[in-house]
Amino acid sequence: MEEKKQGLSRRDFLKTSGLVAVAVQVAGIGGAALAAGKDKDSYTGYESWEGEQQTFNRKKYEIDEVPYKQVGEVRRPGRYTDLIFIRAGIFMQALANGWTKEDGIDALGEPLASWYKEHPDALDLDIERETVIMPNAAKDHAKYDDYFSLADAYAFGWEDIFAFYPAEPTAPPEVSDFTITHINPGMTYEEPIRETPLPFKSKDHAAELVKKIAHRYGATIVGITKLNPDFLYDAGLRGSPDPGPFEKPEHWEYAIVMGVPHEWEQVLSNPAHGTSYDGYNRVRNASARLASFLKFLGYPSRSHHPPFHYDLVVPPIAVDAGLGQTGRHGFTIIPETGSNIRLACVTTNLPMTVDKPIDFGVAEFCNDCKICAEQCPSGAISFEDSPEGMVIRGYEHWYIDTAKCFNFWQQAMGPLGCRLCLTVCPYTQRSTWLHNVAKVADINDPTGLVNDSLIYMKKNLFEAPEVTEYLRPPDGRFAGYREAPEWLDVTNWFDINPLNPQIGG
Amino acid sequence: MFQGELFWMVMGALSVLIGIGATMWAKDLGLKMNWYKWVLVVAWYLLLLLTVASPFTLIGENEVGAAYRIIPFLLVPTIILGVALWRVLKLEPKK
């Protein structure tokens, strides 16, 4: 009674303080969550040059066998056929020389003739690209280029250096991998820099140092594996005067695979406002520098890097090196950045401890998800429930129609390419607590419930354009998955009034 | 303001106040608390914080639509579990 007369008791004060503290703490957590969502540090990939961004504990998910199956006779990828860029170039030349479908496939000569007989749909798509899509695209560029000019200019800034660095090999690997060709003659080494390689203390030391250096040169993730020759192109070894078939050079024993993601704000605005060249350029620099580093130590090395300077296909080698797993869309999905990764590789004979492949549940997730297939404007990605029965060059693999994919590239506005499948992939998430919790829960849930819930939420909570909206007008509006970041919106910076097809209507 | 060591120190201090207040509320409301009831209370409170934090993180990521749509996903189970928790808290321990 005495306490009541004096006002609020100590007990009531503490009880009231407790309630106020709940309100303040809930508000504080809300504010912290908002800040976490906006935090640029969640744009993982470039925040450290010492490897801290390779955060996933791969040891826990290591497996002894690769997470893909050989189901038939292996055929190495055809440089002049399977590689769409080269095939498109050869085919375009044939058209320029007057070839028409009436002349017959054989008139195209080998290896295109045999390949088109195996892939008749691709022939029709390649014809459509050259005769319908590209002329339409030329009209669209004339109409809308101003609106996309900032994204185009930004991409060009990344792109133009690849003509200069690194210099392409001018001799077969038996020569060029031991020497250094440079556009500056003063930095060209026509003989090996060291006669005998600097010996490492052990394979572990070699692997550790190589990874440290690769990170310092800009690689977000790095892994090492023995090189599987199945993934070398069948012909046209770079630097070789012979454009024909080649065998794996003896000194290509190991592959050091590395990856760098695209810029996170920009990648969300694919297809129109994104570019491939930021990731390409960053990973190419890391790979080329690492090759030069190894040559300087006396170990023959060759960098295989974007945009098309490869003697091998990197994604399956990245899987071998334990960086990730192949997704439905054909990209390697890595735990840290999902499908947002660009890869390069250095082949060498430096003995190193290799990494094991990993299985963190991508195959099961991709079987159920299908978001990339649903969003793909070209229809290039399979909708099947599993890759069972699909065989690419002797391996079970999701079928990707590269001709359809490439045809959409040609009609899309903005920097060349599409990249929508890597954008919409649910694994492609910034490193915020929310996505990290979801990722950890999914990877460690044996029931598949989290898997199903995340797919449901991605499909039902997150907005996405209708697939036709990505197409050219009048069917579509050259939509992006998300709007361009403010720094790529041309109307924010230039005194122009461009025609904006993305408004639609 | 919402990041850094000072912010999380304040959050920690608030947790102490909440803990003291909760024990007093429980006593004054006549709840017979034991260890597992406290565990359930803490778990539910963490769920409440998660329910608040998730949409705000999505707003920060510029996914405002997803933020609004995730609220019922989290809020409904939080309310149902809150009601269930209240009934558990009112149970008398077996003698």
Image (tube, coloured by chain):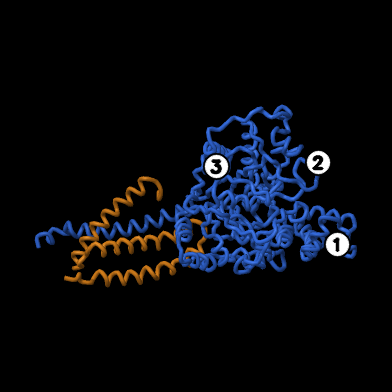
Chain colours: A blue, B orange
Pointer 2 indicates a residue of which chain? A
Q: CA distance from mark 3 to mark 2?
A: 34 Å
- Asked if residue A312 is positioned above or below residue A114 in the image, the reply reads above
Mark 3 vs mark 2: which is more N-terminal? 2
Residue B7: percent from left, percent from top: 36, 48
Residue at the spot of label 1:
A105
How many labels were placed on the picture? 3
Name the residue type under label 1: Ile
What is the three-letter code of the residue carrying label 2?
Pro
Q: Quickly name the residue at label 3.
A: A353
Residue at 59% x, 51% y is A320
Badge 2 element: loop
How crowded pointer 1 is (Cα within 10 Å; few <14, some 14-19, many 20+) is rated as some
Q: Mark 1 to mark 2: distance in Å? A: 28 Å
Mark 3 or mark 1: which comes first in sequence? 1
Q: Which mark is residue A170?
A: none
Residues A188 and A295: in front is A295
Nearer the viewer's eye, disc 3 or disc 2? 3
Q: Is residue A447 above or below residue A335?
A: below
